[in-house]
Amino acid sequence: MGSQPQQHTTATDSPLLAVYREEPQAAPTSMRRVYYLSAALFLLGFALLPIDHAVGANFVTPGEFAWKIEGDLRTLLLLSEAFAHGTGVVVIVIAFAVLDRQHRSLFYVPLLTALGGGMAANILKVSLLARIRPHSFDFSQPIGDTFYAALPLFNSAAWDHLGQHSYQSWPSAHSATAAALAVSLTMIYPHGRWLFVGLTLLAGMQRVMVGAHFPSDVVWGWAVGTLFAAAILDHDRLIRWSNAFVGRLRRVWGAAEVESA
């Protein structure tokens, strides 16, 4: 009896890529650990509330520690915003598509995941809780006063400030974008997970350093981003949705060509 050739996979292969290549034997990607991480980050946000006042005041005043972040370290933190900003995400995805020809057809995975995570955080800003940013807060007041209004979109008392940048501290959309991007890139490049985690941490530190967010805002942003990424990547949903959408477009296009023939 002849033996069948065995299929070998590389260490960088992931179930998500296998699904894209339509290999039925590949197990769907499970995001269980990412869900757990999101829950842990959500709880950590509450744990950081007691230090929000001191840390926020330090970087807005600025305090002694703020002045120590200078030179190349400050430049590194400022540049790390690219990993958490929509424009930076687009540049990263373009680089991904140009440099990795084998997987360039998956460019939309990190793009949609990252931008969607940031959008989810922005929706929460106006629909769930309004919080004053550190650079606009009077630190002679208790930290609880930073939470300006609940359900601001439906609260007439908050309508005068609805959409204003100074009242959009919670949660950090930059942090949500970075976390969602890190999760999606890890699915494609598992060997780079710690690089992506490091860039996410640096981007979060940058948001605190410039007085845009409190530490708890950053961590809650990470929670939102990881949760969003897990929701659309779990069991390869985004891949399957996109394949179904493209298939539907092809059928519609084919039917239109037949009618015009």
Image (cartoon, rainbow, N blue to C red):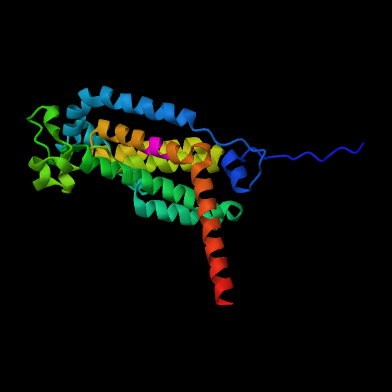
Write down the quadrant of residue 66 in the picture: top left
* Quadrant of the drawing holding the C terminus: bottom right
Q: Residue furthest bottom?
A: 261
Image label count: 0
Residue 249 placement (x, y as % from top left)? 52, 61
Query: Does residue 55 appear anywhere in the picture?
Result: yes
Residue 34 placement (x, y as % from top left)? 45, 31
Of residues 67 and 247, the one drawn nearer to the viewer in this rendering = 247
Q: In the rendered image of this protein, does residue 94 appear above or below residue 128? A: below
Question: In the rendered view, does 223 fall on the left or right side of 158?
Answer: right
* Quadrant of the drawing holding the N terminus: top right
Q: Residue furthest front?
A: 259
Question: In the rendered view, does 144 fall on the left or right side of 194?
Answer: left
Dominant secondary structure, magenta: helix
Assess whether residue 122 is covered by the magenta stretch.
no
At 61% from the left and 35% from the top, the residue drawn is 27
At 53% from the left and 33% from the top, the residue drawn is 30
Boundaries of the magenta span: 225-229
Write down the quadrant of residue 87 in the picture: bottom left
Q: Residue furthest right?
A: 1
Question: In the rendered view, does 237 fall on the left or right side of 17?
Answer: left
At 55% from the left and 36% from the top, the residue drawn is 29
Query: Does residue 76 appear anywhere in the picture?
Result: no
Residue 21 placement (x, y as % from top left)? 63, 48
At 16% from the left and 44% from the top, the residue drawn is 166
Q: In the rendered image of this protein, does residue 121 appear above or below residue 141? A: below
Residue 193 placement (x, y as % from top left)? 50, 36
